[in-house]
Image (spheres, rainbow, N blue to C red):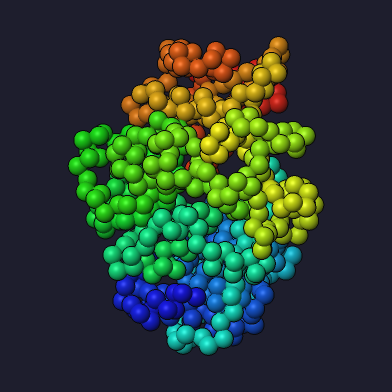
């Protein structure tokens, strides 16, 4: 509810700048208050749930702010989903309100049609959706002054669902309050200056990281947000230079594409105000991050966390001393590395990474006690995201990959992220995803799926060159035996590679070789 305070102190300060319209802090706060009153007039109140299906536009922030001050459980929904997939989340979250962006009218209309009972309130942003009232009409006649009985709400985001139905990650209000009053290392490092700073939002706001780092955090600090609605590396550079961007959140694929811009063009841009680039969500190859720091300076910060909880944080200076680390946990007991029998491993031994949940407000998977219980390590409050990694002699955490992505060839563990990192240094490679495919003798073998840089043609000769490139830099058992090509690799909007989709393409059940000819 700090939004109301900032609106009172600096009502004309820009809060949201976007292709779909702008809002000052005063306008954003007033519209949030109007929406609270409009929803209350329609019977919505403390404890109800709201689903938002919306592109990166000002109304996203308005709906979130209204939810936070009227005690709602706020669930943003991935607008890439199909109607039935949206319907599952709306129904599972027990949403009494659905606010939808008319850009996605067909899927949203189909989603509501799938529900056994229609939500009490349906509002359409930016156009018409059959059966929905217009958002602008709903708030138009309402009072924009601050409500005098604010009740804290909370967000409940859904997991990506790569291994089954997505689940809502929920926390009690006590946990929300504890998180809001605890200053993390990343927040301390950001050092916001409301009168001077602007944050660039590069990713979709329905994801946890852009929502937290590119909306909630800056707005709570009184800092305006320049919102992109879709990634483009040159547009990002234009916005950073034009607006004097000071803070941004990105994912490693964005770094790789920025660095692919010719060096003289990159260095001609005035990015002198940029002092805080934070990233996470997916592994960043050492060569990519080192090149980014060399270009931008020591302004790059990394976190290891997920919707379920936080792990570690690292500055540029510490990373340069420990290339590849995702940071040193805040306390010695915050991270445990365990073997398959959940027994502790020593330093530099790879195992499953377990993180210590906060003492107050531990997450739970909404309406899934079994999955919640399985995610925690007994009653000790540790949980895992399924990542593998190790702690070095100085207590720094290094990740080697995810257990679901591990390739086992001839009984030897092979981590795809290590091979990805090597191939990304080849001048012809724009993006890459390494997977395991069936091998009758070894169980699995390594396959690299490559997206070529612009102007580079896929060919058997390039495939052979890439295999040789790896064999010069990696132990031979880690190197791909085959290389295939795609025009574009499947990635989540948060930057994570969809390796399962690659396996569906190149190792389908009816193709035991997992090999597709060029």
Q: Is residue 71 above or below residue 317?
A: below
- For the point 42% across and 41% down, which residue is it? 318
Q: Is residue 432 left or right of residue 308?
A: left
Q: Is residue 405 above or below residue 107?
A: above
Camera sees residue 83: no
- For the point 43% across and 39% down, which residue is it? 319
Who is closer to the viewer here, 215 or 313?
Answer: 313
> How many dots with numbers?
0
Q: Is residue 176 left or right of residue 484?
A: right
Q: Is residue 457 above or below residue 106?
A: above
- For the point 65% across and 78% down, which residue is it? 46
Camera sees residue 273: yes
Residue 358 place in picture, x, y as percent = 64, 58
Who is closer to the viewer here, 66 or 358?
Answer: 358
Residue 241 place in picture, x, y as percent = 25, 52
Residue 284 place in picture, x, y as percent = 46, 37
- For the point 44% across and 33% down, which residue is it? 323
Who is closer to the viewer here, 200 or 223?
Answer: 223
Q: Is residue 481 left or right of residue 343?
A: left
Residue 95 place in picture, x, y as percent = 66, 68
Q: Residue 385 falls in which quadrant of the image? A: top right
Q: Is residue 409 above or below residue 25?
A: above
Q: Residue 68 falls in which quadrant of the image? A: bottom right
């Amino acid at each position: 509810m700090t939004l109301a305070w900032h609106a009172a102190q600096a009502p004309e300060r820009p809060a949201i700048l976007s292709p779909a319209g702008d809002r000052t802090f005063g306008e954003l706060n007033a519209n949030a208050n109007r929406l609270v009153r409009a929803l209350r007039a329609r019977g919505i109140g403390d404890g109800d749930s709201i689903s938002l299906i919306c592109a990166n536009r000002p109304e996203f922030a308005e709906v979130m702010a209204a939810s936070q001050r009227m005690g709602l459980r706020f669930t943003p929904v991935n607008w890439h989903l199909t109607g039935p997939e949206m319907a599952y989340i709306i129904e599972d979250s027990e949403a009494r309100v659905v606010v939808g962006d008319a850009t996605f009218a067909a899927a949203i209309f189909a989603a509501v049609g799938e529900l056994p009972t229609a939500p009490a309130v349906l509002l359409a942003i930016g156009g018409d959706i059959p059966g929905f009232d217009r958002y602008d009409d709903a708030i138009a006649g309402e009072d924009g002054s601050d409500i005098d009985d604010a009740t804290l709400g909370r967000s409940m985001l859904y997991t990506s669902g790569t291994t089954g139905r997505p689940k809502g990650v929920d926390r009690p209000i006590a946990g929300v309050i504890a998180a809001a009053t605890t200053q993390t290392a990343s927040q301390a490092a950001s050092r916001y200056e409301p009168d001077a700073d602007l944050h660039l939002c590069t990713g979709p706001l329905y994801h946890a990281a852009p929502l937290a780092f590119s909306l909630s955090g800056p707005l709570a600090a009184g800092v305006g947000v320049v919102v992109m609605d879709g990634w483009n590396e040159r547009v990002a550079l234009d916005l950073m230079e034009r607006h004097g961007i000071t803070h941004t959140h990105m994912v490693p694929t964005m770094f790789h594409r920025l660095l692919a811009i010719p060096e003289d063009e990159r260095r001609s841009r005035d990015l002198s105000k940029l002092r805080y680039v934070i990233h996470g969500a997916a592994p960043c190859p050492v060569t990519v991050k080192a090149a980014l720091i060399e270009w931008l300076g020591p302004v790059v910060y990394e976190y290891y966390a997920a919707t379920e909880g936080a792990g570690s944080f690292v500055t540029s200076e510490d990373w340069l001393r420990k290339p590849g680390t995702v940071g040193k946990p805040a306390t010695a007991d915050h991270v445990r590395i365990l073997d398959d029998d959940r027994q502790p491993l020593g330093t530099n031994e790879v195992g499953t990474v377990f993180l210590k949940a906060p003492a107050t407000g531990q997450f739970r998977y909404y309406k899934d006690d079994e999955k919640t219980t399985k995610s925690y390590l007994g009653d000790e409050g540790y949980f895992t995201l399924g990542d593998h990694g190790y702690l070095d002699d100085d207590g720094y955490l290094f990740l080697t990959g995810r257990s679901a992505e591990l390739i086992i060839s001839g009984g030897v563990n092979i981590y795809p992220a290590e091979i990805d990192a090597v191939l990304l240094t080849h001048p012809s490679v724009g993006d890459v995803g390494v997977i395991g495919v069936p091998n009758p003798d070894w169980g699995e073998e390594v396959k690299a799926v490559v997206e070529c840089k612009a102007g580079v043609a896929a060919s058997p000769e390039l495939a052979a060159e890439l295999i040789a490139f790896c064999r010069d830099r990696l132990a031979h058992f880690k190197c791909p035996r085959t290389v295939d090509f795609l025009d574009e690799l499947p990635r989540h909007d948060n930057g994570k590679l969809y390796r399962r989709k690659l396996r569906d393409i190149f190792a389908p059940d009816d193709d035991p070789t997992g090999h597709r000819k060029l």
